[in-house]
Image (cartoon, grey):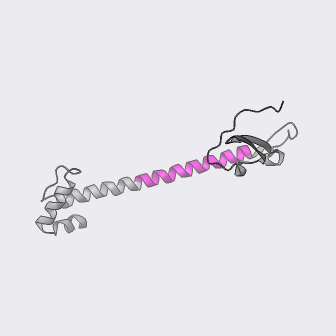
Amino acid sequence: MEFAEYISGHDDGAVENLCTVFKADIPDIELHNAGNKLAELFTSIITEAAGAKRKTAVQHKVFNKYLKKAESFYFTKKTLLYAEKPHPFYEMYVCNNISYKKGYSEVTLKDATVPRLDSKYVIIRGNRRPW
């Protein structure tokens, strides 16, 4: 209401200019209703933005919950050696070497771990046999 009153408090020329500028967004805007129509438009924009922010926050919360569950599921595993209770995966994991082509030469990364792969996008495919 205060915003509508603020707009109405301006001279007719200024309000007419606002009507011209916002005509594409508010087809029925006129001199007598400009304050109310602009207030409605801004209210809808702010409400939509606030809803999007809440939705994003909820999505992040759900995704973080999923990541926690996935981490706890994959962090420990039962194996033939540790059949009775799950054992931490990284206590059993043995790093491998990865060979790849860089230009015309082949490069070998020894004891490859995720942090040591120095690329944003990595695809590891197949198992190259040394024989």
In this picture, is 66 found above or below 16? Answer: above
In this picture, is 104 found above or below 60? Answer: above
Q: Is residue 39 left or right of residue 79?
A: left
| Residue span colored magenta | 51-74
Count of labels shown? Answer: 0
Image location of residue 111, percent across then percent down: 80, 47
Q: Residue furthest right?
A: 81
Which residue lies at the image location 67% right of the left edge and 50% below the top edge?
118
Q: Is residue 96 left or right of residue 10?
A: right
Q: Residue furthest top?
A: 131
Residue 59 located within the stretch drawn in magenta: yes
Q: Is residue 91 left or right of residue 2?
A: right
Which residue lies at the image location 77% right of the left edge and 33% below the top edge?
128
- Judging depth in this view, the residue of 96 and 63 nearest the camera is 96
Residue 19 located within the stretch drawn in magenta: no
Image location of residue 61, percent across then percent down: 55, 52
Image location of residue 33, percent across then percent down: 15, 58
Q: Residue furthest front?
A: 104
Dominant SS of magenta comes to: helix
